Image (cartoon, helix red, strand yellow):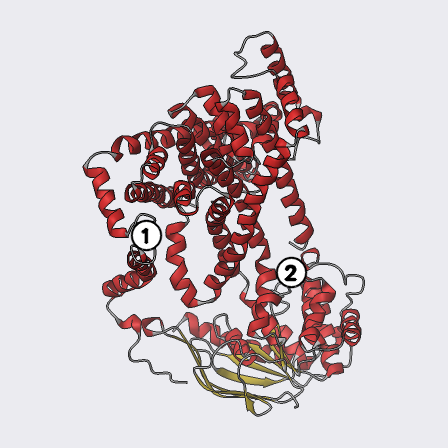
Amino acid sequence: MATNELWTPERIPDPFAGVAKLLFDWIPLLLLVLGWEVVSGRAVSESVLPPPTAVAAATVDLFATGEVVPHLAVSLLRVGVGLSLSIVVGVLLGIGMSQSEAVENFFDVFLSLIYPLPKTALVPLALLWLGIGTKTAVLIVFLACLLPIVMNANNAAENVDRNLIRSARMMGTSDRRLFWKVVIPATIPEILTGIRQAIPFAFISLISAELIASEQGMGRLIRDAGSLGRYPAMFATIVIISAVAYTAVYGFEQVRERVLVWT
Amino acid sequence: MDGSIGISNLEKVYGEGTERTKAIDDLSFDIDGGEFVSVVGPSGCGKSTLLYIIAGFLDITDGTVSVDGTPIDGPGTDRGVVFQDYALFPWRTVKENVLYGLEEAGVPDEEADATAQRFIDMMDLSGFENKYPKELSGGMKQRVALARTLAYDPKILLMDEPFGALDQPLRETLQDQLIDIWGDLDKTVVFITHDVEEAVYLSERVMIMTRHPGTKKTVTEVDLDRSGPREDIVTSDEFTRKKNEVWRSLREETKSEVQP
Amino acid sequence: MDVDVRSLGASSIVDSLKSIYSLVLLLVLWEAVTRMGLIYPYFLPQLSVVIHEFVVLVSTGQMIHAAYLTLMRAFVGLAGAAVAGVAVGILCARNALFEWFFDPLIKIGYPVPVISLVPVFMLWFGIGDVSKIIMVAVGTFWPIAVNARDATRQVEQNLIRSARMMGTGDRRLLWRVILPAASPGIFTGLQIATPIALIITFVFEMVAGGGGLGALEIAGVRGFNSAQTYAVIFAIIAIGLVLDRLLRAARTRLLDWT
């Protein structure tokens, strides 16, 4: 075997290699989009599968005319409020259940019942109680996100390293301060994991609720555009909400890495 | 087919470009069939790399490694590796692990079963045939790994610090078992270790390796009378002398690394 | 969507009475409050009425048929996704070309809220069973593929080396080592995908009709027969619990070596 490699790809100056690698990595996606463009209007009807150029134009249009803005705003509000509520309640419940047996005995049975229930099955019930609109969507998002956060927070709080608690006590930390100084920080990594697991479910529940029970929001817009035959706009709305979900997922991962530099 | 190993001008380079690091440089060494050779050296000297090259798991950059005069080409059933981390198939029971090589060789069921049972018994694993690896202690896992490798009868045993993770009494028991096996089954053994005493106790020759890059430094012949019990061997003058000789040579190597 | 599949502490319901008192309390309260007429029955019918409705729906066969439709759609779709997802996942982990092609697609495709494609599938394949099944398959493909890929990547190098030195060739390696070694991760993928399959089926049935538990449930809301909605939710909770237990039991059975 030859040992002497005078030229290897690694010898290319670094920044260029980075760009080249990025391009190379994303060729499959470009191929897919190109294939889609070619197929559309030839192999399948343009109305069934509008070409990417039409979808891109429709995306620009949705923003230019301002049509998408209220829908996007209301969807972001719903997902934001629902997720925030689930974080607050989930962390309190998860840690509370680990600290008090009474709390655990009271809530455990309900959590065990909702855990295997696909949360979108509760949309009709929410609709019954809260009617069409934001409250229903927020409730469904909240319920869908609650479980992963409770479970991770609870699990972390029950497994805080005994020696951490012992050493804090040894250094004179009182019970109440112990909770804030040791228990909470020790559970943060797993709480963040719970939130990370909840984000995709937040978007799934949001869109489900909006498809079934809403006059507004991205889910409703997708449905309306579909039933009115505005297919490029339908695809464009899906692209926009997917981009939001994508940003939320990978953005949160970045934040988590920043926060957890010490792990 | 006597299980001899020939290594000549072996060179192994990892990575490319600026990442290039030479792990092994110009190493030549011959091992006779049926011989027990230990390789010791400071960590990072490439001794495990050497073993994995002989096993056929890693490509050679330059030079040749041959078994019975034929250059090696990938892994083969003539060589069996005993890994430090056991590498047992966790989804197979003890018996099924030992049977694996026999199944691959197409040995008829009954014969395979009898062979597997023989090695299970030899390694004192009777009664544990239907346990999964997760249910076993480290020492027992290593016995299973040894039984598994012996069962398909490779001519050469390649052992990568197999007892490194075990505590002292267990190590000694397994070392004695290994000597018995070696005597009974006529295998060539290449044994990687960083424990000088273990190397001298077990082997006929000890190769000491330098590091960065790794190559052969010295070879010590150990001619011990191994017929007696362990306590007689380790307290003998010859054992102590050889141990000190190897230790000194190794010490030189680690020192030279600290003060370049 | 990497959901944790551990149970919440000591699994409760059957084990200790202490842990279900709150549920009993809630059910008693439900019946009492509704009997006293404190809540408008459309919001919350009496528990006894819901139970009666449940019995009626089961005895007339409506509930059974709806459950059959929902489960059939969910599981046929899931089966398709399992085959495709495991194949693509393993190929991605073992083959550089596949990895190059599918990795960016998985990275982009995984966070897409697949449920937003329901109107698209209605456009492409209509509102029938086929459309629902394909939708389920597309939605559950991602978690299965990602888990299969990651599990395959994590197969210990020395296990593969062990098999090779004992004479296992390239072709047999897949069945003899890779698949069994990756099976816990693959199973986790299926456990994550199962509730997603049900989520998609319910929503599709609520949006597009065509029978099934989702359609039956939403029909209760629209027909001002809320007892039906509650009864269907009871059935869905029961199905969810049974499926969860079954998957766990299967895992302990099949993967008792882990």
Depth check: give the residue in front, C173 or B79.
C173
Three-letter code for the amino acid on which mark 1 is drawn: Ser
- Same chain for marks 1 and 2? no
Three-letter code for the amino acid on which mark 2 is drawn: Pro
Identify the residue under disc 2. B90
Q: Residue at x 48, y 74 (%)?
A: B45
Q: Residues within 10 Å of mark 1 (few under 14, many from 20)?
A: few
Local SS, label 1: loop
From the viewer's perspective, tell me whether residue B206 is left or right of residue A219.
right
Mark 2 — on which chain does it sit?
B
From the viewer's perspective, tell me whether residue A241 is left or right of residue B54.
left
Percent x, y of residue B111: 79, 76
Identify the residue under disc 1. A45
Depth check: give the residue in front, B115 or A205.
A205
Percent x, y of residue A140: 45, 29
Residue C62 seen from this side: yes
The residue lying furthest to the bottom in this view is: B69
